[in-house]
Amino acid sequence: MVRPNPLLEVYVAEKTAANLVAARPCCTDRSHRPATRLRIQLLRAMGRCGEAIREYQMALASNRNWASAIGHIGRCKIYIGPIEEAIPLEEQAIRLSPRNSDIGLWYFRIGQVHLPQSRIGEATAWLEKARSAGPTLALASAYALKGETERAVILTRSKPGSWSSQALEAELYSL
């Protein structure tokens, strides 16, 4: 007897719902910017990064300075490749909008690209910059790969932004 998998059922339901929303007329009207953004985000969330990249590029034709779109194209490149193309896109987003609330994510993605390419020092530097956005597990991975296991363990002990993480940060930088 095959047991039902509730997580799989939720996943299938979410995918189905996302497909239905993405196909709605309000989401397919390219002149409606919020709907276009929603549609592209849904495509990306559904793992349809190739389609999302094409949609982001069409949207960028009318607004070349949409930093978040450029960053999301970089994110898609991380997923489907070539991964090296992600870094210039994320750096372009940072240059276009250095005060954007997504900047921590852009830093994180650059670090994320460096890690599997064994550029641990560069990954650590970018992940340190991204730290304010909270991706400390990736930073902990970089420290562990550098052989700095004490720092890695400290980073995995608390959630970013919590009161205890401030104490752990003090401990981390005292090493």
Image (cartoon, grey):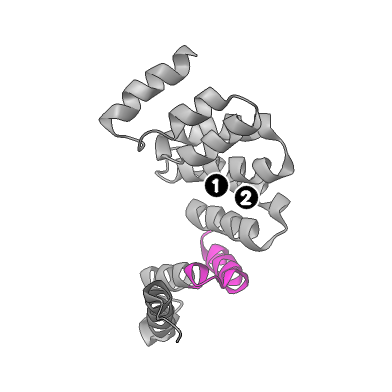
**Magenta region, residue range:** 43-63
Most frequent secondary structure within the magenta stretch: helix
Q: Residue furthest left?
A: 163
| Residue type indicated by callout 1 | Ala
In this orientation, which residue lies closer to the viewer: 5 or 110? Answer: 5
> In which image quadrant can residue 132 be found?
top left
Q: Residue at x 67, y 33 (%)?
A: 120
Which image quadrant is residue 80 in? bottom right
Which x, y percent locates residue 139? Answer: 53, 35
Image-quadrant location for residue 24: bottom left
Name the residue nearer the viewer: 20 or 157.
157
Does 171 appear above or below 161? above
Q: Would you place residue 62 above or below residue 8 in this image?
A: above
Numbered label attached to residue 93: 1
- Residue matched to label 2: 89
Q: Is residue 78 magenta?
A: no
* 98 or 8: nearer the viewer: 8
Residue in the picture at 63% in, 35% down: 123
- x, y percentage for residue 25? 39, 87
